[in-house]
Amino acid sequence: MTHSADPLRNPDSTHVEQPRQRGAIALIPNQCTSCMICVRECPVWCISLTAEKRHDPDAGPRGRSTLVLTDFSIDYGLCMDCGICIDACPTDALEWVAAPLPSASTEADLTLDTGRLADLRLTGSDNSHPLGELNQHR
């Protein structure tokens, strides 16, 4: 068995480092209904969501209560980019974006809040994931 292409075993090989293919999960805040499905479905519990209950007395004879998103965050130190949250979201408030995550100098910088998750969409969204068209089956 030869390892000629492995730079660790053969330093003279012509191994070319591949560019990083990892994108990120972005949030569309105005589409989020705070249903908590993404939070419950995440296998590593990296999503945090808080919402405020608001009552509209003018919506029918008894009024209507709705949840309004106040804070949403993803801890990318825990996130394994599985995409289950994207697939589970009934309102398509989460999506893949091609933009890489900003570099982080501390562990706290790996947690992106509502604003920073929404800003990821501005840096380049193509709704694709490096592992294939994972969320295009809808």
Image (cartoon, rainbow, N blue to C red):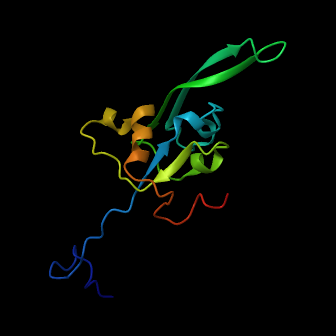
Asked which quadrant contains residue 102, the reply is: top left
- For the point 77% across and 18% down, the residue is 59
Given residues 105 and 44, the one toward you in this image is 105
Q: Which residue appears farthest toward the right when viewing the image?
A: 61
Asked which quadrant contains residue 135, the reply is: bottom right
Given residues 1 and 131, the one toward you in this image is 131
Q: Can I make out residue 42 in this image?
A: yes
Given residues 4 and 124, the one toward you in this image is 124
Which quadrant: the N terminus?
A: bottom left
Q: Which residue appears farthest toward the left when viewing the image?
A: 12
Image coordinates for residue 4, horizontal then vertical, percent: 25, 85
Image coordinates for residue 67, horizontal then vertical, percent: 64, 23
Which quadrant: the C terminus?
A: bottom right
- For the point 51% across and 31% down, the residue is 48
The vertical placement of 101 against 71, above or below, is below
Given residues 129 and 79, the one toward you in this image is 129
For residue 75, side relative to residue 36 (left or right)? left
Q: Can I make out residue 113 in this image?
A: no
- For the point 58% across and 45% down, the residue is 85
The vertical placement of 48 against 103, above or below, is above
The vertical placement of 67 against 81, above or below, is above
Q: What number of labels is visible?
A: 0
- For the point 41% across and 42% down, the residue is 76
Q: Which residue appears farthest toward the bottom when viewing the image?
A: 1
Image coordinates for residue 120, horizontal then vertical, percent: 40, 45
Q: Which residue appears farthest toward the front when viewing the image?
A: 58
Image coordinates for residue 58, horizontal then vertical, percent: 75, 13
